[in-house]
Image: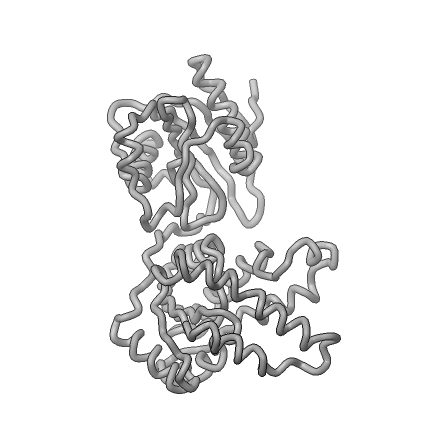
Amino acid sequence: MIVVWINGASGAGKTTTARELIDLIPNSTLFDPEIIGTELTHLLPAKRLAEVGDFQDLPIWRRLVVDTAAAMLSELGGVLVVPMTLLRQDYRDEIFGGLASRRIAVRHVLLAPAETILRDRIAVREVPPDLPDGEMRVRQWSYDQIEPYRAALAGWLTADAHPVDNGALTPYETAVRVAEAVSSGSVPVCDIVQTPEPTSETVAAGVLLFDERDRVLLVDPTYKAGWEFPGGVVESGEAPALAGMREVAEETGIRLTGTLRLLVVDWEPPVPPGYGGLRLLFDGGRLDGGAARRMLLPGPELRDWRFATEEEAAALLPPVRYERLRWALRARERGAALYLEAGVPKG
């Protein structure tokens, strides 16, 4: 199962190209995630919608894009052609990582006409006549996208996607270029970790690593949103401490030796769509400066990493995860492991 994701700023010609592309790629289907965004404006309370500037900022939209794409491919098979602007790397990682977890390969194409051409196309773009002040709002929204697009282009976007300059091409000619690039392998499958979604409770092992100032290492995984500790799910038949050491090596390139000391066992209750399970934190010890400099970044698993104080970690980690860290640091100070439930000590 394959997704061909057509990215680009407003005015790049994503949708018109995608409509031509499904006639050129055998057994392909068009899926426009903007439809989901439009429907959410009818489903969600106005108060919730007012909290975000764009439907992409809604976690439910990103989750539904992944779920819908997976359902369509399960039903139809073949190739899904998805025309959708993605300018935030964390949203790209969340969506592409979600697809990868379902064993769906993503080939990422960027339509990249010159900015002057984008502006010209926005100026003559057709706007639905039934939208109040629609022409002004839609055009301004499109112009406002140019600056984030420029920033993404200067950063992660060109390194991630296969660019096609379609400034002088018709939608059909652009689709031919994209189809040829996909079929020839010029558009590689995105290098993103594939973490299968759990189907029941899981056991996960995290490892706390410290620098010379006793700050804790936090990582920003590409395959899910939010900061985390190095670690991951314990595989069948695997010892949790060894799983933590394996995950540290895979994510950071740091190979730990010896025995890890258990700090916290935290039971995470199931909260749909998650299943919960046991979360273990181990003390991985202090890293010297050389080990920190040898961290593997960038890579398929991590977007970023940093050493943080306890106070800094409070601003980065989700609340329950921060509580897990806080009590793990207390256990490290006292030399005795703690049992928690949802981040709260018991016994």
Q: Where is residue 261 in the image (x, y as percent from the top left)?
A: 36, 21
Q: Is residue 27 visible?
A: yes
Foreground pick, 142 / 51: 142
Rendered position, 122 above or below 150: below
Rendered position, 240 above or below 133: above
Q: Where is residue 223 in the image (x, y as percent from the top left)?
A: 42, 50
Residue at point 37% right, 28% down?
Answer: 209
Rendered position, 103 above or below 233: below
Quarter of the figure with residue 175:
bottom left
Quarter of the figure with residue 202:
top left
Name the quadrant of the C terminus. top right
Foreground pick, 197 / 168: 168
Residue at point 30% right, 75% down?
Answer: 181
Rendered position, 206 above or below 127: above
Foreground pick, 268 / 310: 310
Q: Left or right: 48 with respect to 105?
A: right
Name the quadrant of the N terminus. bottom left
Residue at point 33% right, 51% down?
Answer: 300
Say how many tags the image has.
0
Q: How is the image coloured?
A: one colour
Residue at point 42% right, 55% down?
Answer: 97
Q: Position of residue 185 (x, y in %)?
A: 26, 71
Q: Can residue 204 be seen in this view?
A: no
Check the image and name the residue furthest to the top: 334
Quarter of the figure with residue 103:
bottom left
Q: Where is residue 235 in the image (x, y as percent from the top left)?
A: 34, 41
Foreground pick, 323 / 209: 209
